[in-house]
Every structure is written in C-alpha cells, then in structure tokens.
Amino acid sequence: MVMEPSTGKPGFLRNILVRLLLFGVLIIVVRFAYVVTIRGESCDLGDFCFFSLPENLNLAGAGKLAASAIVVNDAVKSTSVGAVQHDLWTTRDWIKAVRFHSAVFQDLIAEGYLSPSSKALCVETLAGQDVFALKEIGVSDSIGISKKKSPPLVISGLPHRQPFDDNTFDFVFAGNSSLDRSALPYDFASEIARTLKPEGFLVVHTAAKDTYSFNSFIDLFNCCKFVKSRDIDGFDSSMPHIREIVMKKEGGEIYRNGVLREFHGNPANKCSVPGYKQELVRQAEPLITEEPLKPWLTLKRNAKNIKYLPHMADISFKQRYVYVDVGARSFGSSIGSWFKKQYPKQNKTFEVYAIEADKAFHEEYKSRKGVKLLPYAAWVKNETLFFEINRDPGQKKEDKSRGMGRIKPVQSSNSLVSDVNKIEGFDFANWLKNAVSERDFVVMKMDVEGTEFDLIPKLFETGAICLVDEIFLECHYNRWQRCCPGERSSKYQKTYDQCLELFTSLRQSGVLVHQWW
C-alpha cells in the first residue's frame, strides 16, 4: 500500500496566513471608517490611511447638515482643523444647532435680508454653529467673534470692542440671547451699528417678550429702522422660545419702531409718554382714593401692594441704571433702608444720586461709596432760597430727631420752631435732562415737603418727565395732627384731594407713580 504525503500542515499554515491577511484588511477598513464617519476627516493623516476621499463626498442617509458635520466643506477646508473641533462638529447638539440656524438663515435669504454674497458676522457665538450654517448654505464670507476663539469659524473679540473697521458687514447676527446677557448692552449695540454697513441688516435672537423690554431693545439701535419681528421655537431648553428681530441700518436719522423719533429736538420741548409705558400704569396697584385717618400707617401698609416695574417687565436693554432720591435726608432714610435692600434691580448696578439741601446730612455721604450727593434744593430754577427746618408743636430745638426741611419764604410762626438757612436751589428738570437719557432706566423717589406741586408740573412742561420710568412720590397735604385731635397741620395748604389729582394726572399721562410715605 502506497502512502500519499500528508498535506495537513501546509494547509493549516495557509489558513492562518489568510486569516491574518483578512484581519489586517479589517483593521484598515475599520480605521478608514472611523476617520471618515467619526472624526470627519479625509484620509490624509498618514496612519492607516492610504488614499484620500473626494472633496465633494456626501454621505447618504444622514441629511445635508449631518453630512456637513462629517465632511468639512470647501469653505472650511482651507484652514487646518484639529481633532477636537471635528469631535465637536459630530455631536448631536452641534448638528441640531446647525440645522436650526440653517433654517433661520434660509428664511432670511428668502425674504431678502441675507444673500450668498453677503459679508456676515455672528457676534458672541459660542462655538460657531451659526457661522458653520452660514457657510453651509453658501454665505462663504462669514466669521464669528467670541471672547474665546474657536478656529477656523470663530476669532477672538468682544461684542462691545470688535476687531473690525467701520461699515464692514452686510449682515450681522446676534443669537443665543447674547445681547440679553450682556452687561454692556448699549456698547454692544453701538459696536454692531459701527461695523454694519448702511442698508445692512441686523438680526437678533432675544428673549424679550414684554412690550417694555421690546421697545427698550429698539431704542438701543439709534441708527437702525425696525423691520419686523417674529416668535420662533428655540432648539434647546435653555431658550425654548425666541423673538427674532430684524433691523436695517439707515444713516443719520433716529428711528423707533419705524417712526422718526422726536424728543429733544421738539421746539416746544415736550414729550408724550409712549403707549407701552401706559400699559404698565394700567397694571399698577390702585390709588388710595379716600383720605386715610392714619396716613403714614396706611401708606406704609400699602407698600406691600406696590407693583414694581421690574416685576412687570424686563429692564435688561438699558444703557444705564439710575436712582435719584430727591429729598434724600440721611443715607438710611430711603437709600440704605429701602432702595438698596428692597427695590428689585434684576441684578443691575444702579448709579445713585442723593439730592439733599439740609447740611446736617452732608457729612455722612462723604463715606458712602457709589452715591453722588447734590447738596442743593431741587427747584424750578437756579436761585438762592430760604430753607426752613420744621418741627412739630412742642418739639424742642435740642431734640435729637430733626424736622423735615422745606423751601419757603421766611415766616414767623408760633406753632413751629425753625432753623432757617440760605441754600442754593437748582433747576431740577434741566439737570435731569442733562444727567440721564431715554436709553437709561431711571427710578425716582421724591419727598420734598410740598415742593412736588412745583417740581412735577415743571417736569411735564420741559418734557423731562418722559425720562423717568418709575416714581415713588410722597405728597404733602394738611393732614390731621396726632397731637391735636380735630386739627389739621398748618405746614401745608394742599388737601388730600389735590394730592390725589396729582397722582391721577401722572398716571393718566402714562407715568408709573406710586403713593409713598
């Protein structure tokens, strides 16, 4: 019997070699798939890549924007991009944000506010999803700025200090509520106005919903005409609802809601309180129409019912925040005890002006940082006045409690003990018009011992009343005296009905005023 040579061993070795070869091919294929589908890069990295992908490759099944996140498009390829950026570009949140912005920008193209030839800027973009979306839909000349750069889409730059020349961009986009969060909204808006070309368009995504914040936003852009606004759904829970506002830059004139604004240039120097402020007045707490028997106690209790403006509206879009205390007395009288502690400021920092003529309170303000003292009497014009410190009947001059001061001619009185001083009065309405503007948020407290009947009409006459957003007014009238039942105070000649008329006239004019004590 003839034995054939055994072939088992060579066949076994051949099988091992084939398997090793197949395993090597599998590794190459897996590496290739990883580079292309996960990292979003063409095979030009050297390790395990032996050929390059076509530049115009699109991966089916993922959609146009998903493919864009996988394969770097022509507009971005010119700049080298690291693996970190590509890892970011393939995340679900990134792709969702790009899809959202792409839809927004395509609508704007369809409406004529944006075109492929536009030079576009995205302000305060976090990672450049909006810039990526612009490039994806064909607006290739697009760039973003943020405090932290994210090349190649975002360069370093602050929204209120942009690294660009005047009139550089045809289209500016400020998304993600970036203007809402800005600590310098006026500077933010001014830089946009500077770098946007005339006839260029600005699109802002904001959370501004109430009419007060909306109009405050419009007032930030004194170079631009309001075009349109719409409400859209956001792409994540941080901003589920968005108001999109479109504005167009127009040179020279100042627009507000598409209408040429008039205020200081008005020959009569008058103003009319806009309708959106009148809406706030209608939401305010009702006035106390019946004269209270215990006025101080009644008004103090009523303070719990007061509807503060910042509780009714967003005050974010203002250039400055100013509190003016007219008749401030000591720091603790109202600035320290009430405004600093209780007034709802929405985390804004207020400039504080204390207007106080009584020299007895001037010294303590020297050590109060953040408070500017005006050591004069608020009056209707600049002139020297007599300032009288009034005390209740029976109160001695040596008493520690100091009476209230008021402006009046020197008069003899058997019921009051008085200190009389010469002081300087200043034109309060004129000062206010020079100290603040329509773009500022101004809160005023006025306790001037009867002089309100002179000052308020002057504020209306000069138009300065329109600069004040909210007033806390103590109106002085001939109240019933605690000491003497059945007798009214002789300090003041006005009646409660006249005070009520003053409050009513302010509210009917659209001024948010509260009865104060």
Image: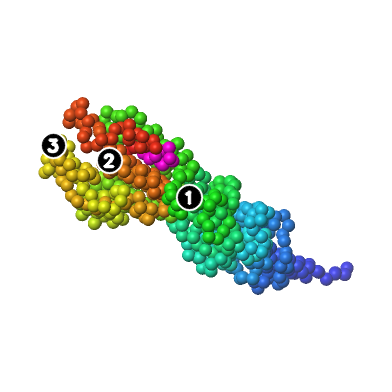
Residue 235 to residue 120: above or below: above
Asked if marks 2 and 1 touch (Cβ < 8 Å), the reply is: no
Q: Find the residue positioned furthest to the front.
A: 267
Spatial CA span between label 3 and label 1: 53 Å
Packing grade of label 3 (10 A; few <14, some 14-19, many >=20) is: few
Residue drawn at x 35%, y 53% is 430
For label 2, the residue is 450
Measured from the top left, where is residue 413 in percent x and y?
Answer: 15, 38
Find numbered disc 1 in the image and state the secondary structure of the residue it sits on.
helix
User: Which stretch is magenta?
Assistant: 506-514
- Residue 169 belongs to magenta span: no
Left or right of 338? Residue 217 is right
Left or right of 501? Residue 93 is right
Find numbered disc 2 in the image and state the secondary structure of the residue it sits on.
loop
Q: Which mark is residue 414?
A: 3
Q: Which mark is residue 216?
A: 1
Asked if marks 3 and 2 touch (Cβ < 8 Å), the reply is: no
Residue sitting nearer the eye, 384 or 448: 384
Residue drawn at x 12%, y 40% is 396
Residue 400 to residue 60: above or below: above
Q: Which quadrant would the C terminus be assigned to in this image?
A: top left
Name the amino acid type tagged 3: Asn
Q: Find the residue positioned furthest to the right.
A: 1
